[in-house]
Every structure is written in C-alpha cells, then in structure tokens.
Amino acid sequence: MILRWIMAALHLLALGIGLGAVVSRARALRGVLDHAGIRRALQADVWWAVAAAVWIITGLLRAFAGLEKGTSYYLHNHLFLTKMAGLALILLLEIRPIALFPRWRRALARGEQPDTWPATSIARTSLVQAGLVVLMVFLATGMARGFGSVGP
C-alpha cells in the first residue's frame, strides 16, 4: 500500500516538474540566446529529462508491476492506449532536442556560441509537448475513474 502511494506521488510530482520544465525550455528558447539564455534552456531540458525518466519508471511500475489495477486493465483501456500514444509522440518529438542539445553543451564548454537557428522550432515543439502532457492528464484521470475500459 505504501509503495503504491509513493509511486503515485512520484508520478504526479514528475508531472509538475516536467510540465514546468518543458514550458520553461520553450520560453528560454524564445528569449535571448546568449550563453546565459542557452544555459537556461539546457537547464530546463535537464529537468524535462528527469521528469520523463521518473514518469516512465513509475508508470511502468504502476501499470505492469501489480501496483495498481493490473496489466490487463491497462492494456484493454482505450484511454490508456491513447495516453501511451501521446507519450510515444512526445518521445518522437524529443529526438531533435536530444540530438541537438549535446552539441550546444559542447560549444558552450569550449566558450563558443552554438548555432541556435533551430531554437524557435524546438520552442514550438516544446509547447506541443506541453499540450500533450495536459491531454495525458485528462486521459489518466478519465481512466482512473473507469472510462475507456473494454476489459476482459
């Protein structure tokens, strides 16, 4: 019972951290991209990654380690499957920042100004990801109330 509570709390804490981080990343990428501005974007990106890791780990444990309603419930729930499609889309949208930001970090470490031309596009992507997170919250709360189940 306590483990279920802790996993649920961590899952929800990751929501706040992740949503704040991805919106902060978008704002930083739309701002002045001097060294300080880039560092703000990269710092927000780290928090976004931490939140994603916590979400995925706690989500897998909650759904498939017997901590919540059981694997069968989740795999036969349309809202859960839609929520997982949203997560997959968020992860696909994250491929570009994952590929780009290490180059920015290396450039900053060398004292150089990174090529920030994709910043506006990544800011837009970050806001789409934030919207998907909000959608996932609605799907999760519906699912928790028994909607979407076609169960066995």
Image: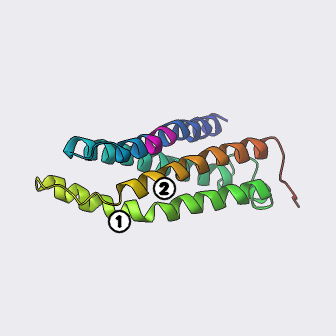
Q: Along the line of sight, which residue is nearer the eye, 118 or 72? A: 118
Q: Residue at x 33, y 46 (%)?
A: 41
Whether residue 99 is situated above or below residue 36 in the rendered picture: below
Magenta span has 20?
Answer: yes
- Point 28% across, 60% down: residue: 102
Magenta segment includes 81: no
Residue 25, visible in the rendered structure:
yes
Q: Which image quarter holds the N terminus?
A: top right
| Side of 38 where 12 appears, left or right | right
Identified by mark 2, the residue type is Thr
Which disc is residue 125 wearing? 2
Would residue 46 be visible to someone looking at this image? no
Q: Nearer the viewer, residue 31 or 79?
A: 31
Q: Mark 1 — residue?
A: 99
- Of the 4 image quadrants, the one containing the C terminus is bottom right
Secondary structure found at label 2: helix
Q: Amino acid at mark 1?
A: Ala
Instruction: Determine the residue located farthest toward the left in the rendered image.
Output: 111
Residue segment shown in magenta: 19-23
Viewer-side residue, 28 vs 134: 28
Where residue 32 sits in the image (x, y, percent)? 28, 43
- Residue 18, image x, y percentages: 49, 43
